[in-house]
Image: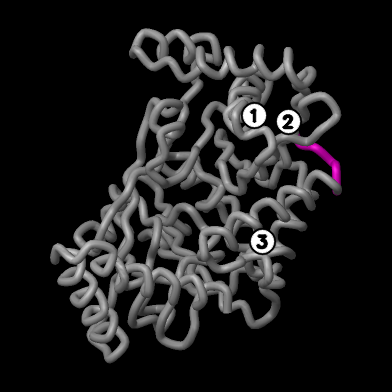
Amino acid sequence: MKIDVVPALELSPEACESWSAAQASDPRFDSPFLSPHWARAVAQAQGPASGVRVAIQRDAAGEAAAFLAVRQRGATAMPPGAPMCDYQAVVARQDVTADPRAMLRAMGVSRYDFCHMQADDPGFRGHGRGQCTSWIVELGDGYAAYEAERRAAGIGVLKDIDKKRRKVEREVGPARFTALSDSRADFEQLIAWKRAQLAATGQTDLFKTPWVMRLIETLREVRDPAFGGGLYTLHLGDELAAAHFHLRGGGTIHGWLIAHDPRFERYSPGLLLFQDILRGLDASPYKRLDLGAGDYRFKRELSNRQQMVTFGFLGAPSVSTLARQAAYSVREVAESLPLGPVSALPGKAMRRLDVLRGLG
């Protein structure tokens, strides 16, 4: 088995084409986070010392057949763009069995920490330490069919959104939806709202990190339907009520940065905007809206498909692997004890450390 390792920004056009073809061969790979363009965008934003590298496993004929992108720091690695990366997987042709251990070994990586690995990725099966659900809205037959399917399933969320839309238009003003907005002011307001959310919940302010803003700013300018960002806005009357910044690629729009004006909270402007985006998919090349992980009621009710994702690590025998194993052991013991909020502290500490590692 031959495995090549190249910096993401040095991927050849042929390698990118083979990667994109492998991605298109399996519906579970249809995520912009699994695209070669994501790895390259992150590497560009992080600069020459990014450490974003790609292991390319070749088949018996020497053709590029499987791809794993990581951000390497010494002998350990994380997903490129973590903590902003919502999916990980080894992207491989269906006729190829990928060997992630060999790919990591070729990169000189003794431990790879993942946070949103697809649970059905065969190379990482058994290495997860926990899992959660990513919620997906499939609209292969269009919005009207999706709406009828939700109604038949006894889910009234779309009917409730329609009621709120009529109410807000009576009390505030007409709702105006803009897809792929160019408004700089609306983009900056979204970032301000997100920073306020992070501060209010005691989370790390991701937007203080220069490469994060460079990445988002660059993606905002990309209009290629195959890969890029997109600002979606909802105005009520003359006021910006909600704004979303999503990642686009393949047949998917992935929900990424979501916020709204608290003054309009009672009208659920974020949900109104999601409905507008879903309706707009009929006239777009996209057939699904991936809402990402997180057990929120609106995600459960809007989604009609799920993708399980896991967090954990894949490691070879090493000091760093033993340290990670010990940290998870402490976490698992704490979470098994009836200590209330104290049981969650080791897990929170690990997640916070991983966020800081990714941002650094």
For image coordinates 73% across by 17% down, the residue present is 171
For image coordinates 49% across by 20% down, the residue present is 140
In this rendering, the answer to whether 186 lies above or below 166 is below
Q: Where are the magenta residues, as a range? A: 180-184
Residue type, mark 2 in image: Leu
Contact flag, marks 1 and 2 (Cβ < 8 Å)? yes
- The spot of residue 167 in percent (x, y) is 65, 15
Disc marking residue 234: 2
- The spot of residue 10 in percent (x, y) is 65, 70
Check the image and name the residue furthest to the bottom: 319
Task: Report crowding for label 3: few under 14, some 14 to 19, many 20 or more residues within 10 A (C-alpha).
Answer: many
The quarter in which the C terminus is drawn is: bottom right
Left-right relation of 292 to 235: left
**Spatial distance from mark 3 to mark 1, Cα to Cα?**
27 Å
- The spot of residue 130 in percent (x, y) is 26, 58
Task: Report crowding for label 2: few under 14, some 14 to 19, many 20 or more residues within 10 A (C-alpha).
Answer: many
Q: Quadrant of residue 29?
A: top left
From the image, tell me which residue sits under label 1.
273
**Spatial distance from mark 3 to mark 2, Cα to Cα?**
28 Å
Contact flag, marks 3 and 2 (Cβ < 8 Å)? no
In this rendering, the answer to whether 358 lies above or below 141 is below
Left-right relation of 348 to 188: left
Task: Report crowding for label 1: few under 14, some 14 to 19, many 20 or more residues within 10 A (C-alpha).
Answer: many
Please name the predominant secondary structure of the magenta segment in the image: loop
From the image, tell me which residue sits under label 3.
41
From the viewer's side, name the closer residue of 260 and 17: 260
In the rendered structure, which disc, 3 or 1, sits on the residue that comes first in sequence?
Answer: 3
Residue type, mark 1 in image: Leu
Residue type, mark 3 in image: Ala
